[in-house]
Amino acid sequence: MKYLLFAALLLADPRPVHAGSCHGGGNAGTSSSGSHDDGGRSSSSSNDTSWSYTPSSAGDYVVHSSECIDNTDVHGFRHCSKFGAWGKNMRIPKLFIEVGGNVRNFGSALVDRTGTISHGYESFAYRVVMPGADAPRDVAMTSTLRLGFGIPRGFYSGLEFELGALVSPAAATAEMTTAGAFGTPNVEQQHGMFLGFTGVGGYRAVGSRGAIAIEGAGGLRSVRYNFDSSYHYCETTTTVTANMGVVEARARAELWLSPWLTAGVTVGSNVLERSDWMAGVYFGAHSRAYAGAR
Amino acid sequence: MRAAVLSVALTACAYRPGSFSHLSESFPGQRTTVGCIDLSVERRPDLIGGGTVLAYAFGNRCDHPAIVDFTQVKVHARTYDGRDLILAAFDPEGQIQPLELDGRATGEEAIAYKIDASLAEVCVDAASLTHESPARWLCFASNLPPQIAEAGK
């Protein structure tokens, strides 16, 4: 914003632009200019900072860009960057971000579900029937995004968002319990959607090549089961949504690809439904080397 | 977006202990190791207004953060007429402060030491940068003959 404002001032000022107008200098004894140049890096002048200003036209739009350019990297004379940029990541907390994919196997939430389908002015009630399965199960494949921060002594916590598809829902049909003028709709099961949002907390033990962690996750899961319905010349989709709480225990193992990057695998089980399990892979990036745990 | 990808790629590359090289940093000048820090110091051409510039490049050999403290660096100099001086970093805005360098990370700073004299020799205690002891002095002679240096004053 500061740069844009300065660029606007330059645009309004017909006088030539002088280098060194970035912050006005103000450094005692820096009015002298010139120096022995060592690859253009060593200079004693306060006039070592310049601004490039490039208005360009693209159709009916005028694009203004400005960029602060220092002619020296010497502290006290440069203006575009402050001292200690190399230590910037140490000023923020221990953060990490992970992306990955999971496979989840869990009990279907369709058992004994009922719903309604509307076709025009007619509405039909149905109940879900799951033939030939005592404990029908769904399989979902999801993508995960996790943001977290480290706590001293190897502990960490974070939030995890998960979105995916039901790639293999338990077989189900909708048995109509009401009929209309043209009979009952023809209903076919389709794939569904999986959505999860959990808070996680765990303990990470960092070794020389990688790290292992145990963690707990708790939150909400929403599974949407889709059914296509055709009735006379009308087609529509009805959705059965099941929301449930989830508490998982997980184990994780990861390798350090670099001090700041990891690749890992995770397995877990739902504490509330012992037969539910998940497995996944992920890549992670950390704000501190080795998660700040060495 | 490209800058973000490049930043991730560059930060993903760790400094290799003892290599004195890294993708984004060169390590010119005299090299030494003090504690966790691999350090190189180069004396650049002197300031015309008086004083000198020392360029520091450093990499953390350790997996954990290490202190890099330019406020504690001892820099001594000797003029052509034999006077011994203690130099202070030119820091008009008071930005210099002790900072931590992340494990296996690198950094560089060029610090000016302004003084109204031509300096025949400048010595820096590399160990003081990382609060180590004993002192480890790196000395740099002027790259100009005394006559020319004095004439420039």
Image (cartoon, coloured by chain):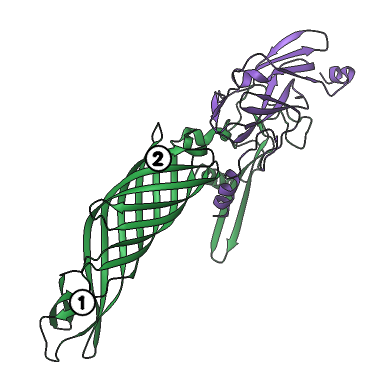
Chain colours: A green, B purple
User: x%, y% of residue B26?
Assistant: 71, 37
Task: Please rate how many residues cluster around mark 2, counting C-alpha atoms within 10 Å: few if below 14, some from 14 to 19, many from 20.
Answer: some
- Percent coordinates x, y for residue A69 in the rendering: 64, 42
User: The residue under label 1 is which amino acid type?
Assistant: Pro
Q: Are marks 2 and 1 on the same chain?
A: yes
Q: Secondary structure at mark 1?
A: loop
Of residue B77 and residue A201, the one placed in the foreground of this image is A201
Q: Which residue is mark 2?
A: A149
For the point 63% across and 27% down, the residue is B37
In terms of sequence position, does the residue under pointer 2 or pointer 1 come before the other? 1
Relative to B151, is A64 on the left or the right?
Answer: left
Pick whichever, A21 or B26, lies toward us. Answer: B26
Q: Is residue A39 visible?
A: yes
In the image, taking residue A92 as reference, residue B17 lies left or right, namely right
Left or right, A19 with respect to A89, comes to: right
Residue B141: which disc?
Answer: none
Mark pair 2, 1: CA separation: 46 Å
- To which residue does mark 1 refer? A131
Return the residue nearer the eye: A134 or A40.
A134
Q: Please say whether residue A82 is visible from this viewpoint.
A: no
- Residue at x-position 19% and y-position 78%: A174
Query: A185 above or below A199?
Result: below
Residue type (three-letter) at the residue carrying disc 2:
Phe
Q: What residue is at 74 percent from the left and 15 percent from the top?
A: B116
**Are the residues at dot 2 and dot 1 in contact (C-beta closer than 8 Å)?**
no
Tell me the mark number nearer the camera, choosing from 2 and 1. Answer: 1
